[in-house]
Amino acid sequence: MIARATGRAVKWRRRGDNALRFIAAVPAGYAVASLWAAALARVLPGSRVGATVAGALIALALCAAAAMYAYGARSGARALLVLCLLGVVAAAIVWASVSASGRL
Amino acid sequence: MIWLVLPLAAVGFLLFGLSTDDHHLRRFGRRCAASSRRAMRIGGWAAIGCCFPLAIDLLGWIFGPIAWAGLTMLGAGVAFVMLNFAPAGLRVRG
Amino acid sequence: MGVGFGVGSPVSRPFRQSQATLHTWSGLLLGWVLFIVFTTGTIAFWREALNRWMRPELPRIEQPMRVLSGAQAFLQRTVPDGQSWYITMPSDRMPVATLFWIPKTDADAPSGRGRRRRGTDTQALVGADGTAVVARDTRGGDFFYRFHFDLHYMPVLWARWIVGVAAMMMLVAILTGIVTHKKIFRDFFTLRRGKGQRSWLDGHNATAVLALPFHLMITYTGLVTLMAMLMPWGAVANYTDEAKISKALFPHVEVPERSNRPAPLVDLVPVVRDAERRLGGAAAYVEVREPGDASARITVTRSPATLLNTRGASVAYDGVTGRPIWQSPPPDGASATAGVMIGLHAGRYADLGLRWIYFLCGVAGTVMVASGLVLWTVKRRERLPDPARPHLGFRIVERLNLGVLGGFPLAVAGFFWANRLLPTADAGRAEREVTVLFVVWGVAFVAGLILRPRWGWQALLGGTGAALIALALFDLATLRPGMFARFLGGDSLWVGTDLTLAVFGIAFLLIARRVARHRPTIRVRTRRAAISMDAMA
């Protein structure tokens, strides 16, 4: 009985973990990449058009990297946490930069 | 002219392939000795190393790297087909 | 998946294994879309060649400038006061100019919408003699090009999102594939034939590693072509209005205001010659705004056939005096990078030899995707508790593999056959060819659901092979002037294309024979025997 109950708990923990990894890999990964696309477009040197394009080029690679990290991390919760922190950093850069110098 | 890169790359990859145990045994009838393996690897690297400067010299810095990448891949493909699809009787004696 | 975790935390697992899981699922979920995108994209490397091959009536290759003056004569006769003319220049791959025009917008014209819809009366193929060439109505190689990213029977935006997401999953699958198989670079010379799962794995590895630079390049640059849609957030952060960035990215001469003072249009040939000198390469597109008016303006864009960056430079001229008035500024570093990446993806700059390399790499990519999808079932079949009655997920993947990997090539063969067999004079023929493709595919799919997989594979692969070989023979018998006469006249297109089709046909037949001779591996047999013995006991 106990063995079966533990088995079920382990199974549910694994399912929860997989769900968190999926959330980290797909929606969170895309959101973080998007925020960094915006942040890089604001802070990269050179013309605004150039920085915008360069930011998007890098963000596409970030998307793939985020998915790989989400599945490679020690746990799904940890992956989600790290990605959220990275997103917050990028959002702060965008917010600071836009409120300082506005948009074209 | 740029097609010169192709046989060079193919030879390089053939040497790499023949330095592995499986292919060496199949084509030479014996296991690969450590010394000949090293020689083959060095030869392979030398052949493939020559491809890049050759391609740059022939086509310049924009289309040279592209032709180099393409022909190196094609050379690896040629080597792969030769190693795996050449008749089993095709052997080197000695 | 995740079977082998240790006693400790159920969630911690080695990095490589986690990446293998990701590799499996990111490759599988949209794998069938990827297969179609890879197949059509690979065929689309021969877009111009197929445009011509599917219109055997076209005249032989002419001097581009002679065709241009023929095109101008045609347009001046047909739409002297049109709003704009678009001329796609002939090239060494296309003997005629492709013309498209927008008639003058008249306030009292009886609603121009109905006339514009079919578009047949606002476009033409025109040769050097200034008359419209009568060729069968077909979408030719352009069909594969559009299908590659716009799919069919669905809104373009949806299709591009589906293709974009599939491409991202492909990128993840390639990267995780590299991480997972630590020995791929050492193993890639090895192909163990006739060894079941091992052979599939070797084939998957070989096609992946041999063309790995191509696969990475084509997938990433493919994402770059859809970048404005997939990743617009940098633009949102920098610009208040979308128009501002597109103006900065694609600089364009301003549209003239019609003056309504008639003035003859300058001869286009010297203008285009001058533009080619200024742009440093052959011209691809000529746009004329307000021809026959004093405000007429000509824009000439450089051909991507000689340039890596697809965002070709352009020059604008006054249409009456023929004097240059504007030239596009040199692109910014990062935009040039993006343009070069798109150029690398489309390969329009590639000459015949390099185009063959592109094509062969595309074939390798298609085989890689297909073998990966088959590998999923091969791996799991050996682990099925009862191979006679597999679980639902297994059966879905198996049937989808059959219907897509086996069915789609047959549908493409059907498309080519429709091009040869549908009556050439029919209206709406181009769309009917496409319908044939989907009908054949639908029938193949249903056959794949009904037949036992083994028979299904044989029927679809064998059918594709036979159809392709028969197509080459049909051309040999019916093409007039014949393909060898054309070859001796300096035009190798028909011989080359039909020979390629025949080679692919033979390859399909060989694979079909291989499937017919295949016996399930001994491991499965012993297990099945064990199960039946259990049942008897």
Image (cartoon, coloured by chain):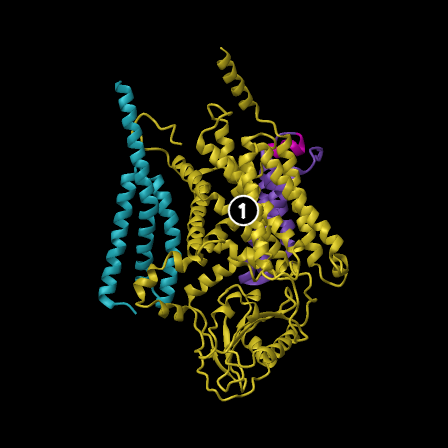
Q: Position of residue C450 (x, y in %)?
A: 55, 35
Q: Chain of mark 1?
A: C
Picture quadrant of residue A21 = top left
Residue range corresponding to the magenta coloring: B22-29
Tell me the residue at 56%/81% (across/down): C80
- Tint applied to chain B in the drawing: purple
Q: Quadrant of the N terminus of chain C?
A: top left
Picture quadrant of residue B85 = top right
Compare residues C400 and C329 and report the one nearer the observer.
C400
Magenta highlight: main SS: helix
- Which amino acid, mark 1? Gly
Chain with colour yellow in the figure = C
Label 1 sits on residue:
C365
Task: Answer with left or right where residue A31 lies relative to residue C196.
Answer: left
Compare residues C469 and C490 and report the one nearer the observer.
C469
Q: Residues within 10 Å of mark 1 (few under 14, many from 20)?
A: many
Compare residues C505 and C129 and report the one nearer the observer.
C129
Chain with colour cyan in the figure = A
